[in-house]
Image (tube, rainbow, N blue to C red):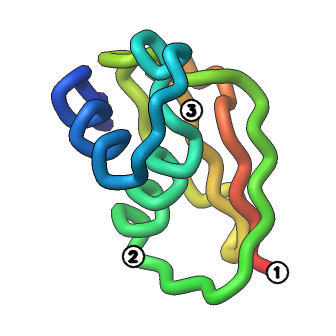
Amino acid sequence: MFELNLKQVSEYLTLINDHNPVHKQIVPGQMVVQIALTKAKVNWSAYKVKYVESIEISEVIKVKFEKPNKLIILNENDKIKIHITKK
């Protein structure tokens, strides 16, 4: 399990030059996807993402394999936030 704090999100937003004010409370979805793929130790060249629900800054989340070709990102209450499926 892990969480992304405001400092980490701010650094990421600076790198990608994103000034969307919604990210003062919500973690960018692609940031979460990139971290999830790294934590799951997969190197998928193509994948499909389904964003189910936003992830708030400092929300505790985890990455699990639902199937060999599908990752899910859940919060600490096991509520699914994001699906990532290998193409």
The amino acid marked with disc number 3 is: Leu
> As displayed, is residue 75 above or below residue 49?
above
- Image label count: 3
Specify the label residue 74 is tagged with. Answer: 3
Residue at coordinates 77% horizontally, 30% vertically from top-left?
A: 52
Comes first in the chain, label 3 or label 2: 2
Q: Nearer the viewer, mark 1 or mark 2?
A: 1
The amino acid marked with disc number 2 is: Lys
> As displayed, is residue 21 above or below residue 47?
above
Label 2, on which residue? 41
Secondary element at image label 1: loop
Residue at coordinates 64% horizontally, 48% vertically from top-left?
A: 72
Q: Quadrant of residue 3?
A: top left
Residue 72 shown left or right of residue 14 in the figure: right
Inter-mark Cα distance, 3 to 2: 17 Å
Comes first in the chain, label 1 or label 2: 2
Label 1, on which residue? 87
Front position in the image: 57 or 37: 57
Secondary element at image label 3: strand
Q: Quadrant of residue 76?
A: top left
Q: Residue furthest left?
A: 7
| Quadrant location of the C terminus in the rendered image | bottom right
The amino acid marked with disc number 1 is: Lys
Comes first in the chain, label 3 or label 1: 3
Front position in the image: 55 or 65: 55
Q: Position of residue 17 (x, y in %)?
A: 41, 47
Residue at coordinates 79% horizontally, 65% vertically from top-left?
A: 48
Q: Position of residue 7 (x, y in %)?
A: 17, 28
